Amino acid sequence: MPATSDVPLTVGFDLDMTLLDTRPGIRATYLELSAETGVYIDADLVVTRLGPPLLDEIRNWFPAERVAVAVDRYRELYRDHAFAPTVALPGAHAAVDAVRAHGGRVVVITGKYEPNARLHLEHAGMHADALVGDLWAETKGVALREHGATVYVGDHLGDIVGAKHADALAVGVATGPYGAGELLAAGADVVLADLTGFPDWLAGHLAGRPVG
């Protein structure tokens, strides 16, 4: 429901493929990890399924006894290879600005390692009032509830799960691995092609117009 003077507007955003196109940097990092460790990683495949925790992806390529070390090394390499190629997705800055224009707070709730997520936002010149990383699906919902978010915007089915877990409005954006139909079928309350449509949608939502 729209925010009121008693319930200030707080909007949550996912990071990867919602606010930022992190695919080139993630691909570059996996290629470097593969070259360094000698373990084959299909980086082109990896970037088609962003969203779930890093640990889940690393397990696809490394034996169990090497997973923890590979995760740590990936996060180290990420800082050298991932930020420069990353760009904001269309409408991302305007979407964040729209929340603030309505007196709202922006919280970024992401599955990404939090220190690297923070550096991503700094590199993109994007400010969040709160940032929580290393979360997925229902655990995103816990953070959304803790921060009082009534809307959560994301590209992944796991983001919809998180929004529903927090009783927040689930706004899907078809900029990640799922199309509009898949996001709606998973329970999204509304789906936008990308964030360029978010300011108008938010204005309508706050004015009490129908969600869709």
Image (cartoon, rainbow, N blue to C red):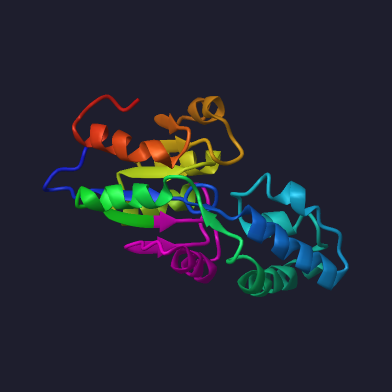
Tell me where residue 41 appears, x and y as whole percent.
Answer: 81, 57
Q: Quadrant of the N terminus?
A: top left
- Which residue is situated farthest in the left direction here? 5
Q: Is residue 102 magenta?
A: no
Position of 178 with respect to 139 (left or right) is right
Position of 191 with respect to 42 (left or right) is left
Residue 169 visible to the viewer: no
Tell me where residue 148 appears, x and y as whole percent.
Answer: 28, 52
Tell me where residue 34 appears, x and y as whole percent.
Answer: 81, 65
Position of 132 with respect to 178 (left or right) is left
What residue lies at 36% left-to-right and 61% top-to-bottom?
128
Asked if 210 appears above or below 201 in the picture, the reply is above
Q: Is residue 115 magenta?
A: yes
User: How many discs mark residues in the rendered view?
Assistant: 0
Position of 12 with respect to 148 (left or right) is right
Tell me where residue 170 appears, x and y as whole percent.
Answer: 40, 37
What residue lies at 59% left-to-right and 34% top-to-bottom?
178
Residue 177 visible to the viewer: yes
What residue lies at 76% left-to-right and 54% top-to-bottom?
43
Q: Quadrant of the C terminus?
A: top left
Asked if 191 appears above or below 106 in the picture, the reply is above
Task: Tell me where the magenta segment starts and ends, as one range.
Answer: 108-137
The image quadrant that residue 48 belongs to is: top right
